[in-house]
Amino acid sequence: MSQDPHGHAHHPELTFWEKYVFSVDHKVIGLQYLITSFFFLLIGFGLMMLMRWQLAFPGRAIPLIGHMFSADLAPNGVMSGEFYNALGAMHGTIMVFLGIVPLGVGAYGNYVLPLQIGAPDMAFPRMNMMSYWLYLPGGILMLSSFLMPGGAAQSGWTSYPPLSIINPGQTMWLLSMVVLITSSLLGAINFLVTTINMRAPGMSLWRMPVFCWAQFVTAVLLLLAFPPLEAASILQLMDRVFHTSFYMPKDLVILGQAYAGSGGGQPLLWQHLFWFLAHPEVYVLVLPPMGIVAEIIANNTRKPLHGYKTLVLSMVAIGVMSFMVWAHHMFISGMSASLGNFFLVTTMIISVPSVAILTCLIFSLKGGSIRYNVPMLFALAFLPLFGIGGLTGLPLGLTVTDIYLHDTYYVIGHFHFVVVTGSIIALLGGVYHWFPKWYGRKMNDRLGYIHFWGTTISMCAIFMPMLFMGMAGAQRRLYDPTAQLHNLPVQSWNIVSTYAAYALALFQLPFIYNFFHSMWFGEKTVENPWKATTLEWACPSPPPHGNFEKTPKVHRGPYEYSVVGRKTDYWMQTDAS
Amino acid sequence: MGTYGWSLPVAASSYAGSIDFGIWLIHAAMLGIFALWGAFFVYLLVKYRARPGVAAEREDHEDTPSHISVPDSFSKFPFGQLLYRNKGALKSLVPDMIIMAFEIALIVFYAIPVWSKIKMVVPEGPEVVHVQLIAEQFAWSFHYAGPDKKFGPRRSELVHFSNPIGLDRSDPASHDDVVMGNELRLPVNKVALLKMYSKDVIHSFFVPEFRIKQDILPGMEMPLWVEPTKTGKFEIACAQLCGFAHALMRGDVYVQTQEEFDAWYKSRLAANPAAATPTNPSEEF
Amino acid sequence: MSQALNPAALMDNADTHSGVSNAKLGVWLFLASEIMLFATLFTSYIVLRMGSTSWPWGWDVLNVPLATLNTVILITSSVTIVMAYAKAYDKDKSGFQRWMAATILLSFGFLVVKAFEYGAEFKLGIGPHTSIFYAIYFTMTGLHGIHILGGIALNGGLLYMSSVDEHWKNPLFLGRVEGAGLYWHFVDIVWIFLFPALYLL
């Protein structure tokens, strides 16, 4: 590709494959990530719907499709323990690594970040393309583990050894993780270099939208936290394939047979290494959605966000602190009790920036002129519901109360509130907000409102009962909750959650229809339908290759709404007047 | 009718009360925080909804612009200038500070002392009931030392379906030992010290009414102490995924008076001490 | 294409907000992630060794002379790759090719010595499964070896590219050599830590 001094690339007309399949344009890649991650989210959701049947009606044959499963998975259509555990482990893995992170980072980050900083593309467009083309095969590899002899991984998404060393399906899980981690690392490098080096003139770091800061901190977390999991996974692969004993102590007797291994390993080592990633990972799950919520709120209150600096510094603080709290997942693990005290303190400290972010977002509403459109409803719902998730983290983060609540449904309720009614609600809101930019058309509002109310209410109905079940001591990962008698007083809640989950599935139909129908037949829209101030709204919808006609020049901060004395209530960052 | 329980089960051990206190206190705080924020949130949503002719109001007056000088009252203190210039930003941290104060109090006065008591104390003395717990896929074995207070040695080579813990019965110390499957008996109001082992994968010993839970790592000895305060039958659940039958790995704790406990122990010994091991459920798979 | 900045043209442009070009910043960030990868393995080594009842002395069971030879080989290869960069900077094609070829040859030499070392162990039936010591030894040196292979591929690719006029004359070529050099120095440094940790302690 020849280049002239101004850096123009004169390339020949792109082939179909170069334009739509192996595109190096961040916008195409972003949409590839969007569709693929929604596809994986649906699969993860489907796995959960199977599990929910078994939880509500243990021992009853799965209706309609039960007979389609083989005898090891569901003899006579009744789910076996192995199958349930496989569904559970894969549901978690798919939702986290194939769903939310690719959606929040790969889709939103890829599409919106370069636009918001005024860049023509990512720093490394080809590497961007490689990231996606590692993600998709990695995901397919992960799913194909269902077809392996012995079935898919069934030791929890947490893969604790020794169980994960002796259980089937784990090798495929580990190999897929290595591929997915590589994809993530390449993406993280791309995001960081782009954000640091490719901001348009005038776009200082303190003029970047909060969304960009969120993506920036997330990229740092991905870059530094994933390699330890990769190393830990390599050790686990060695244990499984080459019969080393990194995680296997001496003298194990599995179901009557002595385990042939040299011994000398420590199961706790995996837990420390895993959670060293997995804790920053949960902030990877939540920071991009917080960024999305910030953008939507600023836009629909018609005023600057409250505490921009506090928001940004809190996100950075969360990023730094996230590396120091991991063992609050391990209070009961058998690690030294004084370590428990250390992580108790760091965990309490990390709650400070989290509360600060929510405070700033809520205070942003004060003094505003709030527009209640569909994206804003999602962004608003995020606030109290993520708040419930965050608050329920308190008894879990406290060593003493965690003794009782650890590994119960209280934990499941807590993290689903954070990730589902938190992250996913925000990610859905982001679709409605940026759809006009992606496709040049608006989504249908009425379907959007139906989707919003149905989704939010169903989600609460699924997860609120879990908090009650946890209080009764109901354990997680039980394929038959009624096998443990202390769960009987709360079994009916399982039925409520199941019906709510099926309702949630139904309420996604208007969304799926709305999305695809609007892509082709939605009402055509202008460059800046939301009358927003940030740079992505200063180019056509959708933007052409290269994004901006001329390199944008940035004159002010990202949220200059309702400036006194101006004709319009928004003053774009690139507006020279 | 339906079973829609929402509360904690009955508290049946000496420290269950402290744990329950923490749970209720935190939940009261959580509900209070949520109610306050929620009310404020709804108020904002109503008061600041978009109305024709009413513009949004920026908060530019919050931070003091640079041309206004810092008054002496502030500049006397370290960071005084920083505080004065960023008054607006710092206001958002007020809710944070209140919650922080609550959390610090919780940690210093509650979590650290109670955690030490439960997890860092190993009870000693002649009155302590010593039991060894051996967990495996998918059963619990409880090994009592008997009147000689000496546990018979266990060896992995001797593990067999009729001897799941591998007790060396040739050793005299094991002659008065009793081994139970999935059944733990304890005298009420006496401290029991469980030393826990796993034969294969990570399990976790959990009795909801006692509020005790501890993961059992294979290759390590995990101590756990409990003082049951109520007689009755309570459930043991495995609290760490341990395989396909993790859901079925349950047992029962029978808390009895000292007399009942002694009588029971005598009867178990009399039945057949050398073979006081029940069928091992795991080999039924 | 717009008048806006083209990512490809910016690859080596050091006139950026950070003062470092995109490509160089990218390489440094990649190395940061690699440091985390190997740091995890070193940490695991420390944890496993401290938690074990017996651990052999490295010099008792491993071939220290061979490993010392490998250390010399690798350090020399870091010098040769710096020379290759210097020649590329001076636009001396044959000089670059000679020094890069020397680097690649030395890398192969490292792997050959490694093969001898592993071979001797395998012949005795020793493998990663033998003990926790051998597990960590084979895993860490093995992963390091894979990184050496990666470096050979990278350097070999650059050597080949230098024979193609279009690539040799590309202003981005020097930056690529520098990036490859940075990666190679990293691989060398990992060995400098690995060697004493496994063989001498």
Image (cartoon, coloured by chain):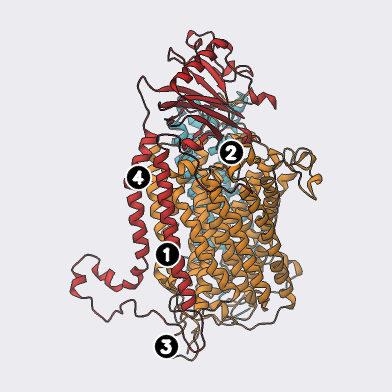
Chain letter of disc 2?
A
Write down the residue under mark 3. Answer: A564
Write down the residue under mark 2. Answer: A236
Rendered residue at 57%/42% (across/down) = A475
Distance from disc 3 to disc 2, alpha carbons, whole Å, reads: 61 Å
State the residue in front, B61 or A281.
B61
Distance from disc 2 to disc 1, alpha carbons, whole Å, reads: 47 Å
Q: Answer above or below: position of B191 versus B266.
A: below
Write down the residue under mark 1. Answer: B36
Q: Nearer the viewer, mark 4 or mark 3?
A: 4
Q: Answer above or below: position of B227 versus A83.
A: above
For the residues bearing labels 4 and 1, Cβ distance under 8 angstroms: no
Give the amino acid type for the residue marked by disc 1 in the picture. Leu
| Callout 1 secondary element | helix
Chain letter of disc 3?
A
Write down the residue under mark 4. Answer: B110
| Callout 2 secondary element | helix
Distance from disc 1 to disc 3, alpha carbons, whole Å, reads: 33 Å
Q: Nearer the viewer, mark 4 or mark 1?
A: 1
Q: Residues within 10 Å of mark 4 (few under 14, many from 20)?
A: some
Chain letter of disc 4?
B
Q: Quadrant of the N terminus of chain A?
A: bottom right
